[in-house]
Image (cartoon, rainbow, N blue to C red):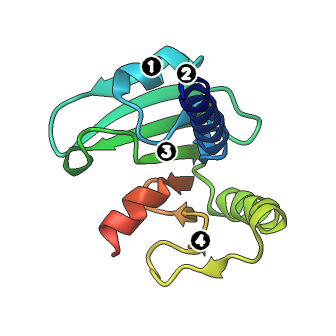
Amino acid sequence: MRVFNLAIALLSLLLLTTFKSDLPTFREVEWGMSQAEVKARESLPLDYEDSKGVMAELVYRMDSRYSPNAEVYYLFPQNRKNRLSVASYLYELEQPDARERLTEYFHRRLNRLHGKGKPSTNSNLPGYVWTEQGITLINDPGSQAVVIDFFDPEYLRYMYP
């Protein structure tokens, strides 16, 4: 009986490990991590941290060939027990034509990886959406940036049941 229980435990551990490795990741972090866990894994220099309010965040500076000012954002909603639920790349570009070119470049890349993205329905934030993958690509004229958001699938199911 002990051998059987040990075999079941090992099989369960193997299945759990396999499932865990199939979860979506963003920059070597995993959905549902705490701020401390993300900070321990992220290799970029921390630029800003806020643990208060309804949306805690970590912001990192990133060197990028696409923008002189690029950042990585990690968002931890309070209603999700301050667990990682949204992660983003933000590329600041003042010139509208530069933002448009970068948006189209990322659109082509994301289409190759995830299939054809649908145009955003928000006319103030032109871009594309990959609903099943939880990805949005936005050319944000207000912040003069191109933003790629990645959403934890569990967070999306929570927000849009």
Q: In this view, does 8 lie to the left or right of 84?
A: right
Quick one: which residue is furthest to the right in this view? 112
Q: Which of 89/86 is in front? A: 86
- Residue 154, image x and y in percent? 42, 58
Quadrant for the N terminus in the image: top right
Answer whether labels 3 and 4 touch (C-beta < 8 Å): no
Q: Which of marks 1 and 4 is nearer the N terminus?
A: 1
Q: How far apart are marks 4 and 2 (CA)?
A: 26 Å
Label 3: element kind: strand
Sequence-wise, which precedes: disc 3 or disc 2? 2
The alpha-carbon separation of the residues under discs 1 and 3 comes to 13 Å
* Mark 1 residue element: helix
Q: At 15% across and 40% down in the image, what residue appears?
A: 53
Residue 60 in the image: x percent, y percent?
49, 26
In terms of sequence position, does the residue under pointer 1 or pointer 3 come before the other?
A: 1
Compare marks 4 and 2 and give the one earlier in the sequence: 2
Mark 2 in CB contact with mark 1 (< 8 angstroms): yes
Residue at the spot x=48%, y=59% of the render?
153
| Residue type at tag 1 | Lys
Q: Residue 42 carries which label?
A: 2
Q: Distance between the residues labelled 2 and 1?
A: 5 Å
Q: Disc 3 marks which residue? A: 87
| Location of residue 133 by image quarter | bottom right
Say which residue label 4 marks: 132
Q: Is residue 49 above or below residue 109?
A: above
Regarding residue 82, the answer to whether it shows in the image is yes
The C terminus, quarter of image: bottom left
